[in-house]
Amino acid sequence: DSLLNVVGFDQINYNKKFATKPSHTYLDFSASAKGYALDVIADYLQQRLIMDYMIEIGGEVRCQGLNENNTVWKIGIEKPEMSQSSGNPYAVVFVNNRSLATSGNYRNYYIEDGKIIAHTISPFTGYTVSHTLLSASIFAPNCTLADGYATACMVMGLEEAIKMIEKLNGVDAFFIYSDEDGSLNSYATAGIQSQIEVL
């Protein structure tokens, strides 16, 4: 609880020239760093008039134009199974001139006293999150946004994430969550429903 006193973006004072922060607060851009790097590469390719590409960095994806078969890029969304290695696909999605970022707690975790401790920590409580949302895949115009929103959704949980995403223009989501009986279920926003196939 003492650490919560130095957590939050309101700790940072900034303008166009500089930023300051308390000594015990630090900035961690890991929630959107891969997405940002991917956007830099996409900009580089487009500056060189390369308009058909698929870039992937650590599971974050940007698809532009068509693939070598002259069709829209088809990307798999992983089944959220508690494993530290890649798993089986849960769904496939056609990604057309958009970015896709997925966050989940099924890969990066440890077990202590029989309890799963996920890597996502709530900035509101200071504790690891524990809710039914297992995987958040966000579709956005750029991957920096998609990456950041995917992480935010994993902090908020299913109901709050749906409310947030449905208020955003140009952003869609595909959520995989656990039902009360432990079975997997999914939710897709209207803008992406026709492009997703659950396997």
Image (cartoon, helix red, strand yellow):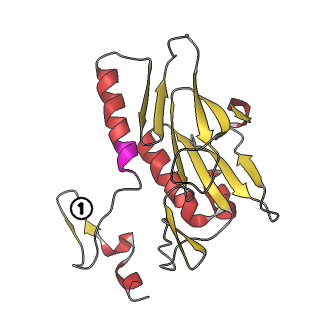
Q: Residue furthest left?
A: 17
Residue at 29% across / 27% down in the picture?
Answer: 44
Residue at 46% across / 32% down in the picture?
Answer: 62
> Looking at the rendering, in which quadrant would you find the N terminus?
bottom left
Please tell me whether residue 147 is drawn above or below residue 108 in the rendered image.
above
Magenta stretch mostly in which secondary structure?
Answer: helix
Q: Residues within 10 Å of mark 1 (few under 14, many from 20)?
A: few
Please tell me whether residue 13 is drawn above or below residue 78 in the rendered image.
below
Q: Residue furthest bottom?
A: 2
- Give the residue type at disc 1: Asn
Residue wearing tag 1: 15
Residue at 51% across / 48% down in the picture?
Answer: 85
Q: Position of residue 65 (x, y in %)?
A: 49, 19
Pick the front one: 30 or 83: 83
Q: Is residue 50 magenta?
A: no
* Residue stretch rendered in magenta on the structure: 32-36
